[in-house]
Amino acid sequence: MSEKLLSEEEDVKKAEELISSIGIPTQPSLLLEINKKISRPDAGFGDLTDLISRDVAMSAKLLKIANSVFFGLREKVDSIQRALSLIGLKNFNRIILATSLRESIGGHGSSTEKFWNHSMTVAGASAHIAGRVGFESEEQAYIAGLFHDCGVALLMKKYQDYHQILDYSLSVASSVSLSGIKKSIIGIEEERYNTHHCAVGYLITKTWRLPLSVAQSVWHHHYINIDIHADPVTRRLSAILLLADYIGGHILYLGGSNCAVENETEWVRMHKKAAAELAVNAESVKDMRDDLVEKLYG
Ligand SMILES: [Fe+2]
Ligand SMILES: [Fe+2]
């Protein structure tokens, strides 16, 4: 067995030990059924309406979203079918997945908010980039972005001092570790907690039965070398996630000191393989970033 595989097995074992002490958040079974229905090519509102109507909590959640200020309607929406057609299947899937993950993981406070802002922005950025580079599934890219840092939430739950390094796990910056050596966030987390948020996140994606390409790209989202993925879809998804993490980080920390990569030219210089995989250059990356800023704040 190769050295790489051995260390991965070890990483999973350590992450499992941490998770067993706090409990892994599980995917609600209704969500699994919804996902199965939505991913069918002939997916329609009919089957989904029946499924949602049988669950009071999910029905209430859906009606609340449809009646939120976001839709600004004069008339109150009180039927599941109308709510679904208003929100659309794609948005519905994204909203339900994000709220279910949030409820399963729990947590509160400013660090938790910071973490969720980052996750939601990177999810949106991933889907946007996927559309721009013609990746086969915008949904898969959205899910990878949404889950990529979910291990952070569990580490925050378990360790009260985690907020001290939160800015580093949400960016690609390296920092000084306990031993005084400059290390990546993975090295720092291993030194402090004997595991890291990428391995913990990987286990959560496996428990939620997400596609293997999503699980693998979550695991390696702090690795610049995307060639470790033999599967072309996973390699491409990892490149998208690396770029989305940069763009997402840059949008949230605009003008702040937390962005390790200062601009698009530097990102492309540092991420040659990912840039080549997506056929992007500094100009097109800047273009994507400007588009997203416009979409979010324009
Ligand atoms: Fe991360
Ligand atoms: Fe991130």
Image (cartoon, helix red, strand yellow):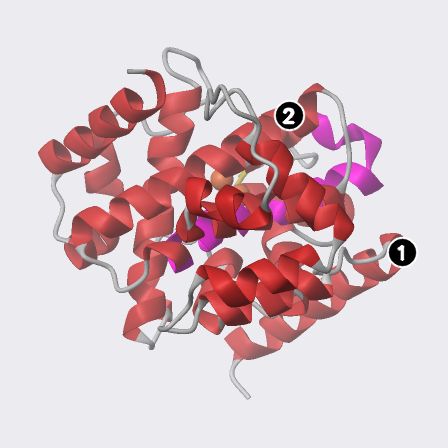
Residue 216's place in the image compared with 59, above or below, is: below
Q: Do the residues labelled 1 and 2 touch (CB within 8 Å)?
A: no
Q: How far apart are marks 1 and 2 (CA)?
A: 24 Å
Residue depicted at 66% across the width and 48% down the height: 100
Q: In which quarter of the image is the N terminus?
A: bottom right
- For the residue pair 249 and 11, the one nearer the viewer reads as 249
The magenta region covers 140-163
Residue that numbered label 1 is attached to:
21
Asked where in the image residue 52 lies, by quadrant, the reply is bottom right
Label 2: few (<14), some or many (≥20) within 10 Å? Answer: few
The kind of secondary structure the magenta stretch mainly shows is helix
Residue depicted at 57% across the width and 27% down the height: 76
- For the residue pair 293 and 17, the one nearer the viewer reads as 293
Q: In which quarter of the image is the C terminus?
A: top left
- For the residue pair 110 and 226, the one nearer the viewer reads as 110
State the image coordinates of residue 105 (x, y, percent, origin top left): 74, 45
State the image coordinates of residue 168 (x, y, percent, origin top left): 55, 32
Residue 211's place in the image compared with 75, above or below, is: below
Circle 2 — which element? helix
In the image as oriented, which residue stretches furthest toward the top?
Answer: 255
State the image coordinates of residue 209 (x, y, percent, origin top left): 60, 70
Residue depicted at 47% across the width and 22% down the height: 73
Please check the rendered image and state whether residue 190 is part of the magenta-colored stretch, yes or no.
Answer: no
The amino acid at mark 2 is Glu
Does the numbered disc 2 mark a residue whose Cβ is under 8 Å from ligand 2?
no
State the image coordinates of residue 129 (x, y, percent, origin top left): 26, 45
Give left or right: position of 193 versus 241.
Answer: right
Mark closer to the observer (1, 2)? 2
> Can residue 16 be seen in the rendering of this structure?
yes
Residue that numbered label 2 is attached to:
113
Circle 1 — which element? helix
